[in-house]
Amino acid sequence: MSGNTLPNPGFRLRASYHHVNREDEVNFGFWVFLMSDAIIFGLLFATYATMVRATAAGPGPKQLFDINSVAIETAALLLSSFGYGMASLALKYELGYRKVIAWLILTLLLGLVFLGFEVHDFLTMFAHGGSPGGSGFTSAFFGLVPLHGLHVATGCIWMVVLIVQMLRYGIDADVRLGVQRLALFWHFLDIVWIAIFSIVYLGGLA
Amino acid sequence: MNHADDLGGLPPRMQPPFGGSTPGDGFRNDLRSYAWGLLLAIVLTAVPFALVHAHALPTSSLWLAIGLFALVQGVVHFRCFLHINPPHEHLDEALLVAFTVIILIMMAGGTVWILGNLHSRMY
């Protein structure tokens, strides 16, 4: 971004915008994406809340959910969030790319544990007659929770790409930006999961 | 594009001796932030799970408790993991989050309100 180009359209109230650098810009753009994603999730939560009793005489939350499995998923995702934080710290304080990669791999493995248990949950639900077409409740559930799982799967793929980039090119400016944005994404997904285990699982089993 | 912090492509930078770049107070503070975040998150998760598992409260108070713990944990995650604590430093992000929260309250809250109202009129 050269000094003369304005970062975005609109009438400027300040004379100079030299302090705006690429890193801030890219991160802010990613925040905008995350918040639009938050609105999608929020509306799917609202849909779920209106549908939770519409079980069409089929199985409801108490028949389909397993609190132990959800607890394991929650622990895996929370620890993976901490692991990612450690990777960010290792990068920020230049503790060497090996430490960054080690923490990223730990985070990745915990993400895969989460996904494994989640898929197992879904298969158990299918086996108990809780398929997406069964009722308004199951439709709303399978609209919301697997979308979060899909996000986690995307984050895992992204993490693999970052690790490969780091091994191939070292820690350059682009890798740094990638790690920063994936940090936002990963911690954001953990926050969405708080809402899922609270509203969908614990709320349904209470 | 700024390559000032480019640490030099191939092969990847070797591991510096520990403390070579002196991880000092900043490192300790950041580590403390993540550790507190993890600790608080574990407590704030374990309590509602235990309450639901033991059916310690009647359903409506259980829902209230779950909601409160979730809200507090959300704030903890925003502060300790996403680091948007001082709004004067990250005003753009803070305003964006605030705007999103307003939209969500109107759209998601409005949906639940209106459909809940219709539901209660039908039964």
Image (cartoon, coloured by chain):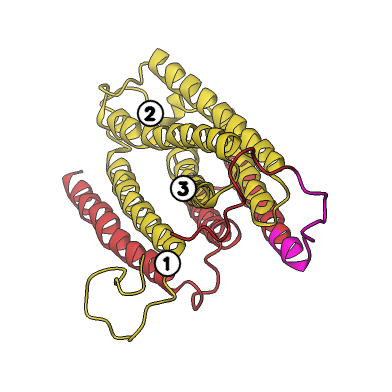
Chain colours: A yellow, B red
Tell which tag, 1 or 2, sits nearer the viewer: 1
Task: Give the residue drawn at x 17%, y 45%.
Answer: B122
Location of mark 2 (residue) = A60
Number of disc labels:
3
Local crowd size for mark 1, using a 10 Å CA cut-off: few (<14), some (14–19), many (≥20): some
Looking at the rendered structure, the kind of residue marked 2 is Gly
Is there any visible trace of residue A118 in the rendered image? yes
Q: Residue at x 38, y 71 (%)?
A: B95
Determine which residue is flagged by label 3. Answer: A185
Label 3 – label 1 distance at C-alpha = 14 Å
Q: Is residue B7 above or below residue B53?
A: below
In the displayed structure image, the side of residue A162 where residue B80 appears, left or right: right
> Within 10 Å of the Cα at label 2, are there few (<14), some (14-19), or many (20+) other Cα atoms?
many
Q: Which residues are magenta?
A: B15-30
Nearer the observer, A181 or A1: A1
Quadrant position of the C terminus of chain B in the picture = top left
